[in-house]
Image (cartoon, coloured by chain):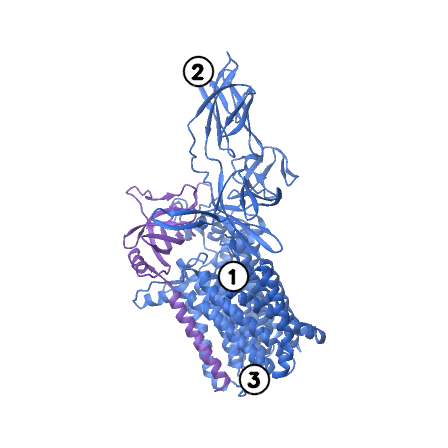
Amino acid sequence: MKKSHIIAIIVIAAAIGIIISTAEDASSYVSFDRAFQLASNGNKTQIHVVGGLKKDVNGNIVGLEKSADKLSFSFILVDESQKEQTVYYNEPMPPDFTRSEKVVLIGAYQNNTFVANKILLKCPSKYQEEKINASI
Amino acid sequence: MHYFIGDLGHLFVIVSFVTSLVSAFAYWKANNASAELKNQWLNNARLAFYVHSAAVIGVVVSLFVIIYQHYFEYHYAYSHSSLHLPGEYMISCFWEGQEGSFLLWIFWQALIGIFLMNTQRIWEAPVMVVFGLVQAFLASMILGVVIPLIDIKLGSSPFILLRDAMDDPIFSLQPDFIPKDGNGLNPLLQNYWMVIHPPTLFLGFALTLPPFAFCIAGLWQKKYSEWIKPALPWALLGGAILGVGILMGGYWAYETLNFGGYWNWDPVENAVYVPWLVLIAAIHTMIIYKNSQAALKSAMILNIAVFILILYSTFLTRSGILGDASVHSFTDLGLSGQLLIYLLFFTLAAITLATVRWKEIPTSEKEASIYSREFWIFLGAITLCLMGFQVLLPTSIPVYNKIIELFGGVSNIAPPADQIGFYSKFQLWFGVLVALISGTGQFFWWKRMDKEKLKKEILPPILISLIIFAGIISIAKVYEPAYVVLTLAGVYLIVSNIKVLLSVAKVNPSLSGGAVAHIGIGMMLIGIMFSAGYSNVVSLNNTGMLISKELPTEFNRDNLLLFINEPRSMAGYDIEYLGERVEPRNAPGYVNKNDIDLTFDPFKVVAKKDIEFKGKKILSAKDTFEINPENTYYEIELRKDGKVAATLFPRVQINPAMGGFVASPDIKRNVSRDLYTHVSLPMNRDEEPEWSEMEEIRIPLNKEFFVNDYVAVLEGVTRIHEIEGFKLSDEDVAVQAKVRVSGERDSYYAEPIFLIKDKAQVGRISSEINDLGVKITLLNIHPETNEFSLGLNTRQKDWVIIKAMEKPLINILWLGTIVLMIGFSMAMVRRFKEHRK
């Protein structure tokens, strides 16, 4: 066999390896129910859950609790299939957290609680100004 | 309303678009014309390109005038600039918006085009056809013209008026309304790196065009091998500039964002990293061809791939397709369709041309020997391509979702949950491969090698590497297997290239660019390994708190809660939070928020007393000075053995454009490690604090009492005749008490006021000492006993939550970057000289 063929085979093998591992390591957007299922089957992978904060009729956020030392907090997230779940996050509450319209969690169930490793917030008017500040 | 400048700018945009097409067409004609007509077409084409370039400069100047003159009737000035913006950041406004960054890109390519037009004889016409087409596509992005009949808007013009861009009711009432001030530049971008990073990056983008244009011209004119010579120096220049641009972005992120590092594997970062890797691979294949007439097809494929990848990265970051996946891509300006056509046009054109010509491209039949340098360079180029492929594949996940949705499917693939861990575990081993290959490949530079000679040559560097490696491992205590291997490979890369450098420098120093560049890469690998692999959180507190009662696992806390003036210990330091500071714009240093009075203008404050910073007086009492009101700095002192080791000022910025709150670190730089500290959570000053119930005391003058555990004393009570600038009438009686409270570091004064107005109404104005969490009210005066009643309220003291990390040996990374760039420049100078011969 020629050297170039050997190299070609190795390159193709490496490329296939990369594709397979990407497919394996890719996370997915799921609901809490599905995440719970995954965790109870012993699957420890981190998944993405998209949802909004739980609010009462007046639009106030419900179920937000900060730890006494302010270093961690928990909240209730309603996912896209309307399932509610208390989520724990081991970081101080981001100042703009309560303003967020949409929250993306990256985390997993541990026993019966959902622990987030990372939180992405989607806030209104993140880039776009809708109104002109005419007062100035 | 200044209509003229905008209309003029828009006219320039249209002219630049049309003339770029004219120039491409005329060059096309010139290329195919007979000898006598050729000159005419050439002259027309050149003229068109000069007019195009002049128009581009006209667009730039018009837009800059609009920003600089604060014409807020224009959307661009309104949304990216403001009256308070310092002059140097006016330049950053220019490319904060998408239109301006396209403009920057067009501008650089126009300059490069003029240069090529005047230096290339044989290549001019075909190369400039490609240039003209690319310029036309880019100019169409800022055209802002609605095509009649089909009613499609082409491009987004930077000269659009505010009233046309925004649907605000004020414009129907008052069509000529002009806002008094603009929204301002995102304060996060008000940083010197953001003044130079975008132009550098876009120059890098622009520099990938000449190699692509030469390659296409070569294929088209059937000069299959001649194009390499003029293309190579441009590729080298592009590799250097793009590399610098990427690293500047990384350095900005390290200094300004709180990601905790210089690289986050964000899709936007990946989108430029991949083309850079492929560009480096392309350069290597071109060098192979120059030396041994092999790898010509690879060189063509890779040069085309670089340009296509640049277009792909433009598409990813500007079409809005990344959406949730990235923190800092542009929003969709409605250009996604146009961007897609731009990408597909050049992809299909290049692939078609290459396929048609494929059979005719000469190939070398002979197999490269393992003992030849070509073999090793080629292996290196392959590794770089795989390295890029590994990053490109997951970065494109949002694209797969979009394509599946387009065909009616449902796809819920998300990017890897732990991006940094995911990419690092692959890129680390590619880094090892790159180091081993380029370390070994260097031995084949000079003479023809065989087994025996190689053994003799390679043995000393291997031994030296092992000794240095053993030293590093034992001193730095690197035990993680992957890191051990990477360290060894990095050391080997440096040592073997130093050996080559020494022998090359003796013969001909101008040839040593490659060796120098590879030494830089070795240093960067080691710097990255230590600073990222051994970055550790030092604000860790192992209190073993439970995250919730239902969850038995214990969690360590990465953050530290600091109360003002209460030292804690962290990473061998005593750490103490000293309070909130502001930064004067025109004086060095920081000013305590307690020492200033606010004015009606949020950008201007008045000093209450002479202000010193580090023992030097920077401001006098009653001085009015400018600040950036959105920035607050948190003074944090680090002490070792009782001596101040560093004073850090991490910043918090109130930044509505970025979601309201942005923390930037302050970095204590040591030779061997950086200590990186940022605020995780500041106190919210808008929230009314919870005060304790008022405690009443009755005391005479000069008698000590306690408030919030601090010693306090009422020093005196005086009659005053005005309150906060308001004169009191003779009928009114007002007295002000002066209470001194001794804090841990300083004495503070509270000056509550007791007022009897119109002989009947009693008013009390309490006084707060922010740092100590104390509020004192003068409740009553008892002339009969010479005593006074004070009301004392206390609250939790001021606090801040911080996170601190150590980044060992990060300076090796920065140093390696500089060495890499020196190597690039040396190689480039050599190739430009060679090309001119």
Q: Which amino acid does label 3 sit on?
A: Ser
Disc 2 versus disc 1: nearer the observer: 2
Which chain is rendered blue in the image? B
Asked if residue B271 is positioned above or below residue B807 in the image, the reply reads below
The subunit carrying tag 1 is B
Return the residue at label 3: B369
Q: Which of marks 2 and 1 is nearer the N terminus?
A: 1
The subunit carrying tag 2 is B
Task: From the top left corner, tell me how far across and down residue B597 is, in percent.
Answer: 55, 34
Q: Is residue B453 left or right of residue B76?
A: right
Q: Distance between the residues labelled 3 and 1?
A: 48 Å
Task: From the top left corner, tell me how far across and down residue B614 is, in percent.
Answer: 64, 41
Identify which residue is drawn at 52% across, 86% down.
B363
Q: Is residue B40 visible?
A: no
Which chain is rendered purple in the image? A
The subunit carrying tag 3 is B
B129 and B510: which is toward the camera: B510
Q: Which amino acid does label 2 sit on?
A: Ala
Disc 2 versus disc 3: nearer the observer: 3
Element type at mark 1: helix
Find residue B368 and report its image quarter. bottom right
Q: What residue type is labelled 1?
A: Leu
Return the residue at label 2: B760
